[in-house]
Image (cartoon, rainbow, N blue to C red):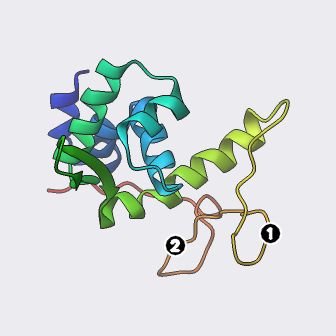
Amino acid sequence: MNNQNLLDEPCPIARSLAFIGDAWSMLILRDANAGLTRFDEFRKSLGIAPTILTRRLAMLTEEGLLEKRRYLDRPPREEYVLTAAGRDFLPVLFMIGAWGCKYRGGGKLTRFVDAEAGTEIDPIAVDGVTGARIGSRAIRVVKPE
């Protein structure tokens, strides 16, 4: 299955994975949510090849999760800042991290701490309508007609 097929799917999970399912893209968004904005900061944090980073930043910008902002005119330099869509992806990253701690958590792990309370973040997914934890009730998939 290619990404174009996924983009045509009625399933929002499939559509989202079509462009964000790449690990590098998710790690760039993780770092952007931690305050990184510049190309060299991302490259140093991730140890990613410049060509791959350039492509991922362009894709995240095209898809509206990041936007370019000029911070220096001579020479021209731009940074990448999160949009509302990029900030809204942080809970998704935390849920992936919580799953990873539970099922892939051997050895030393990075911890994520609430800056104000000083407590480790323990994300849960809750249905906004029922208040029930997602995964605690059976689901039914309803495809569009």
Q: Quadrant of the C terminus?
A: bottom left
Front residue of 48 and 60 = 48
Q: In this orientation, does residue 22 appear?
A: yes
Residue 119 - label: 1
Q: Nearer the viewer, mark 1 or mark 2?
A: 1
Give amino acid for label 2.
Answer: Asp
Give amino acid for label 1.
Answer: Thr
Q: Residue 69, position in %: x, y? A: 22, 56
Above or below 21: residue 61? below
Q: Residues within 10 Å of mark 1 (few under 14, many from 20)?
A: few
Residue contact between numbered discs 1 and 2, judged by CB atoms under 8 Å: no
Q: What residue appears at the point 83 percent right and 30 percent down from the top-left corner?
A: 106
Q: Residues within 10 Å of mark 2 (few under 14, many from 20)?
A: few
What kind of element bears circle 2? Answer: loop
Q: Residue 72, position in %: x, y? A: 23, 51
Number of disc labels: 2
Q: Earlier in the sequence, mark 1 or mark 2?
A: 1
Q: What residue appears at the point 40 percent right and 64 percent down from the top-left corner?
A: 88
Residue 127 - label: 2
Above or below 70: residue 131? below
Front residue of 41 and 82 = 41
Q: Residue 85, position in %: x, y? A: 31, 61
Q: Is residue 107 left or right of residue 6?
A: right
